[in-house]
Amino acid sequence: MGIISRDNTKKKDIVKNIYNNIGIPNVYAAKILNDLINILIKNLILNKLVKIKNFGTFFFKKKDKRPGRNPKNLKYYEILERNVVTFKTSENLKKKINLNVKK
């Protein structure tokens, strides 16, 4: 089995794309991105749901308490209940993403 490489998009990549597409300086593009992320976080905390038309919905999902195991030392732990943020893509975004998928 080979090594699976994963190329994640980083904030600096998004800032560079904003600069390349719109032409505003990187400092302003970074501020816009940080403000957008902060707005999403605040609205999630207040409303527990953020819908962006033609993109998708961010929402909280409650995870119950469950047993877990550390694979390195094989010790068992209790994973506490918690809220996680989940994203569900809109049908419009799914169609755009799957336009170029070969069957």
Image (tube, rainbow, N blue to C red):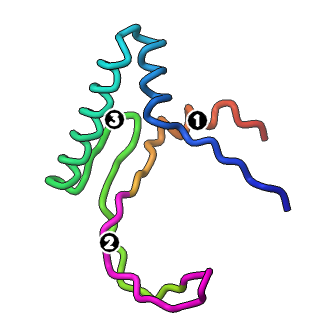
Of residues 48 and 10, the one nearer the viewer is: 10
Is 25 rendered above or below residue 59? above
Q: Which residue is mark 3?
A: 53
In-image side of 64 versus 14 (left or right):
left
On residue 62, the disc is 2
2 vs 1, front mark:
2
Element type at marker 2? Answer: strand
Q: Real-space Cα distance between discs 3 and 2?
A: 24 Å
Residue 62 at x, y = what percent? 32, 71
Residue 52 at x, y = what percent? 32, 38
Report the span colored magenta: 70-85
Q: Which residue is mark 1?
A: 97
Tell me the crowding category of disc 3: few under 14, some 14 to 19, or many 20 or more residues within 10 angstroms, Cα based. Answer: few
Element type at marker 3? Answer: loop
Residue 83 falls within the magenta-colored stretch: yes
In-image side of 49 versus 24 (left or right):
left
